[in-house]
Amino acid sequence: MPPIPPCPAEFEPKLHALQETLRAAAPVALGFSGGVDSTFLAAVCGFTIPDETTLMQLDSPFMGTPERAATAQLIETQRTEDAAAVSRQQLADSTRYIAEGVADEAAREPRVFGCSLVRLAFNPLAEDTVTANDPLRCYYCKRSGFTLVCSAAKARGIVTVFDGSNADDALANDRPGSRALRELGVRSPLAETGWRKNEERACLHAWGIATWNMPAGACLATRVATGERITAEKLDAVRACEDALASHGCRQVRARLIHGTIQVEAAPEEFPLLTSETPKRCTGASVTANVPTPLAHDIAQELSSVSGLPVRPSVLPYRRSGATQAPLDLADSLSPPQFLLACFLTLNKLFWPTSRSKKQASVF
């Protein structure tokens, strides 16, 4: 086991406490999303109990592109390190060619930080309690997903299941998924030992792990306004829009789906990348919550093209958990002609074939 790399000195006592918690609980399974929290916990597991940790990732349509890309990067990094280790072994023992070892490595489960990674197929869209998208959607989804994780862990003889919730999450009062974890007996060692996300980022940065500056993420279901049914088509539209926005350099961004339209939200510092206003108007304190700022027309057209949906003509400041409530009533955020057009397009989408309505989708 490699020694744990140095981290900022003020976090060393807390890190030692976390390591002791992991050692006492081993063997463990960790629900691994690929975000900052679970990546930090996976890294500490890898430095502490790599052979007694199994990372379990739910392969779900709710998973965002940044988390998928981050996981793929971590797997590739591990493969590169493993290949280098095989080469060193070959050079050290010129009398034995280890083709068998190479073959065994190729057949193994992928690894991250020296821990096995298992992907579990999970389709929350098959569950009515989830797709109904009521205020308890996260509870139903988390309970179903972690029931799958707990079952897979039990099949491997693992009793203790972890998730990546931290002390920030423990302070929040709007996380129904936390109740599901408690009911299933899933532990949150980061919360138990008092870790905050900014502290995790600082350690990941010190360790040279690229996930340290990944923007705050959430499953794609949070982009659909509460009360609107979640479908694969809606998730595809949201993912396509956010991937397109990422191609323009945006990092903290959301494409929210409200009344059949796309509403873009972005961090204030990213407004210059998206708006038709000058940077002076679109940075820092000049960006006011829920005050629409014009979205650049070419970007609006691009988003409409990739999603097949009308796009609201403004950008709003990014808000955490924005799907709980629509940011603005449709009639409040659009001019009368735009509102009438949105109503027409929504009805058209309900009663006309998908291919036809997709062609007729437009930008407001």
Image: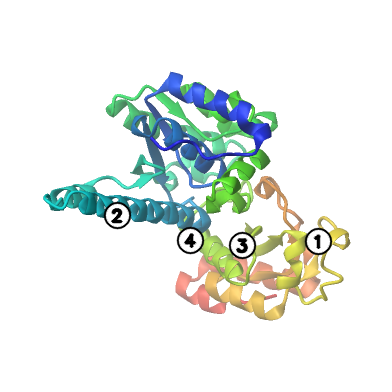
* Residue nearest the observer in this picture, 219 or 327: 219
Q: Is residue 120 left or right of residue 225?
A: left
- N-term-proximal mark, 3 vs 4: 4
Kindly identify the residue that appears in the image at 51 percent across and 28 percent down: 181
Residue identifier under label 4: 233
Residue identifier under label 2: 83
Between tags 3 and 4, which lies in front? 4
Q: Name the spot of residue 188 as percent of width and height, x first.
A: 54, 28
- Outermost top residue: 24
Residue identifier under label 3: 260
The alpha-carbon separation of the residues under discs 3 and 4 comes to 11 Å
Residue identifier under label 1: 332
Kindly identify the residue that appears in the image at 61 percent across and 68 percent down: 245
- N-term-proximal mark, 2 vs 1: 2
- N-term-proximal mark, 2 vs 4: 2
Which amino acid lies under the numbered mark 1 shown in the image of this protein? Asp
**Do labels 3 and 4 touch, CB within 8 Å?**
no
- N-term-proximal mark, 2 vs 3: 2
* Residue nearest the observer in this picture, 134 or 239: 239
The alpha-carbon separation of the residues under discs 3 and 1 comes to 15 Å
Quarter of the image where one finds residue 269 = bottom right
**Do labels 2 and 4 touch, CB within 8 Å?**
no
**Do labels 3 and 1 touch, CB within 8 Å?**
no
The alpha-carbon separation of the residues under discs 1 and 4 comes to 26 Å
